Amino acid sequence: MRPLDHILTWPKKFKGFMGFISSFIIWITRKGPSHVRIYIKGLYGDFDFFEVTYPRARFGYMSEVSPKEYRIEIGRHKYLPFPLPQEIADIAILEMRKMEGTDYDIEELWEHLLDEGGIDEIDNSDPNIWVCSSGGGHIMHWIGYAWHTKGKVVSLLSPQDIRKSDEYAKVKKGGE
């Protein structure tokens, strides 16, 4: 994997509150992934990824993402340079550190439901907190590599929107 690759996951079992959120997201996005993490190994401390999750955004380790528990897909922005320029890495990590500890935006999940239902595609939720995909999208936009669908930046970005974006390139699948 490369820095800033996206780790998309689908849980194999739905447990507790996060299981409810995951199943809701999968239902909203018509069987799309329910979670996004951004791979950062070698960019910040000994952490492997950054994620916006419930209850708060955080840094974590790949040992938490077991193929026994998740179906996993790794993808990347196909125009993101490799090797990653230090300036881009620094901007991404700075933005992640600003986001660390921010609350998960439950209201945005409802916004996604309205978006998928064709009722409202504008994100009217708090612009300073995110769900996993909008947090990842915020970082990618901040470094100059936003996700687009049909040439348009997606306002309400779900994990499935990332996967279907013009710039997404699947690298590998696991946990099948």
Image (cartoon, helix red, strand yellow):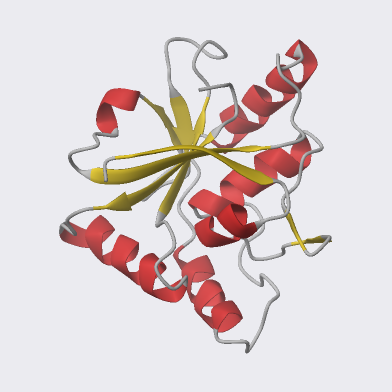
Whether residue 5 sits left or right of residue 123 in the image: it is left
Against 80, residue 130 (above or below) is below
Residue 168 appears at what percent x and percent y? 65, 46
Quadrant in which residue 152 is drawn: bottom right
Q: How many marks?
A: 0
Q: Is residue 129 something one can see in this rendering?
A: no
Q: Is residue 145 something one can see in this rendering?
A: yes
Whether residue 39 sits left or right of residue 31 in the image: it is right
Query: Residue at image x 20%, y 43%?
Result: 69
Q: 129 or 15: nearer the eye?
A: 15
Query: Residue at image x 61%, y 68%?
Result: 125
Whether residue 161 sits left or right of residue 55 in the image: it is right
Residue 99 appears at what percent x and percent y? 57, 38
Query: Residue at image x 32%, y 61%?
Result: 22
Quadrant in which residue 173 is drawn: top left
Residue 93 appears at what percent x and percent y? 63, 23
Whether residue 83 sits left or right of residue 111 in the image: it is right
Residue 111 appears at what percent x and percent y? 56, 75
Against 115, residue 145 (above or below) is above
Query: Residue at image x 77%, y 39%?
Result: 145
